Amino acid sequence: MVSREYVGVASIRGPLLIVEGTQGVGYGEVVEVLGPRGERRLGRALSVAEHSAVVEVFAGTAGLDIPSTRLRFLGRPLAVPVSLEMLGRVFDGLGRPIDGGPEPLAPERRDVNGAPINPSARRYPSEFIQTGISAIDGMNTLVRGQKLPIFSGSGLPHDRLAAQIAAQARIAERERFSIVFAAMGIVRDVAAFFQRSFEESGALESSVLFLNLAEDPSAERIVTPRLALTVAEYLAFEEERHVLVILTDMTNYAEALREIASARGEVPARRGFPSYMYSDLASIYERCGRITESDGSITQMAILTMPNDDITHPVPDLTGYIAEGQIVLSRQLMLRSIYPPIDVLPSLSRLMKDGIGQGHTRADHPNLASQLYAAYAHVQEVRSLVAVVGEEELSVVDRGYLRFGSEFERRFIGQGEREDRSIEATLDLGWEVLSILPRGELRRVTPEEIDAHYRRKEPGHEFTAEGAEEQ
């Protein structure tokens, strides 16, 4: 590797330096930037031409000037040291320790851009990951190797949900499981919350945290998820661990991408975002899965906030095309004090069918989930009818659906921040709330499943399954 040094830049645009007269510079090459007082900053070649290059400076360009700034192109891509010593540690957005501990001893460094996976070497995801959250485990099941984003909005409790999933997620016993958590553009109190949550729950021992703060230069945000995924790939495919990667907030990442594209003078696409945002997001989301050469796996949960709760915004829209489903948080449920406010109807896990049922969770799981979806969808129809004719005009069965909807939201979807439900408890609770409805309304479960799990309500309630059937 041969380093090349240049003195002076042609121009400075936001976090970018434009350098003229370069030769032999490679795309993504690491650049060492020296300011007028000798301070060192790290960057990378964002784009290259025959005799020029655009350099992205991770620490920002404040304090740099055009004539005296020196750049040293190091002839290698940006890499991160990887080792098992990173478990239990907290790093900043560029991989530097911020927990007061020493630099981890790492025998090797890995390119943060990762190595492409041969599609023929991929294994199909088919193993259940328990999050302890009923609305996810029961109705939008997470499977090893899946990418399942969470669509949230400003003010919704996605940070609390992310911390709870990190604390509760587990797989089969005797299998090694780790969390790689990357936060981008978060404020200091949220960063402190995440670190405290990991420490109090004990999850930090088997986790690696990367925290990029809102006050950090936006250029760092582009690198943070790639650092996290590089470490995850090492843990999964070299150490054969099962790794859950949580990325938050991908909207902050996309806005940093837009800022850099604007500084480069690129023609904007939808809402000012660059036209290549789809492929850029895919370069992050597709770095998960299982491969035939390793027993490890990488599962992704990317959290993004939808501006104005708009699911057609470019970030959730493009994410939905790439990922295998989505978990959608509801502002209406939050306003009714239901936590976690997961709206199960627009939520979806496309790989759920391959990770549940006999041999994975429980034999009745697929039909039970389908029945809960169908019943809750009918609840929305009945609630719309109430707005027109009033509740007193409803049939006894429809009034039962209203009660089912309230109980389903309050007891099945709603649970405490520290309430960790097993899959058995989740499924049993699903049958319990379904028992509010008359047996004849349960058309998506088998008679054998009904006989085994259906529980009639005790007499004395306003609505009972027996009373509805008699009518």
Image (cartoon, grey):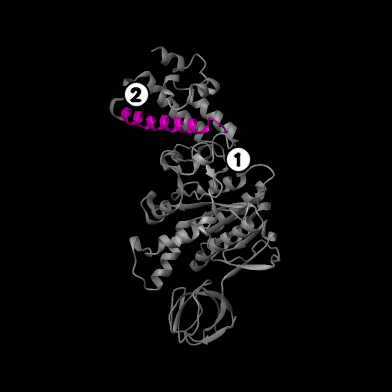
Task: Please tell me how crowded label 2 is: few (under 14), some (14-19), or many (20+) other residues with Cα within 10 Å.
Answer: some
Find numbered disc 1 in the image and state the secondary structure of the residue it sits on: loop
Q: Main secondary structure of the magenta part?
A: helix
- The quarter of the image holding the C terminus is top left
**Does residue 133 show up magenta in the picture?**
no
Q: Quadrant of the N terminus?
A: bottom right
Q: Residue at 46% across / 59% down in the picture?
A: 282
Residue nearer the viewer, 21 or 215: 21
- Separation (CA) of disc 2 from disc 1: 36 Å
- Looking at the image, residue 333 sits to the left or right of residue 178; the answer is left
Q: Is residue 311 visible?
A: yes
Q: Is residue 426 above or below residue 452?
A: below
Give the x, y percent position of residue 372.
46, 31
The image shows residue 10, relative to residue 460, as above or below, that is below
Amino acid type at image mark 2: Glu
Looking at the image, residue 121 lies above or below residue 161: below
Mark sitting on residue 391: 2
Whether residue 281 sits left or right of residue 229 in the image: it is left
Residue stretch rendered in magenta on the structure: 362-386
Amino acid tagged 1: Arg
Percent x, y of residue 375: 42, 29
Whether residue 464 is visible, yes or no, is: no
Magenta stretch holds residue 374: yes
Q: Nearer the viewer, residue 246 or 49?
A: 49
> Picture coordinates of residue 156 (x, y %)?
47, 47
Q: x and y percent of residue 331 in the render? A: 42, 43
Q: Which mark is residue 418?
A: 1
Secondary element type, mark 2? helix
Quadrant of the image occupied by residue 209: bottom right
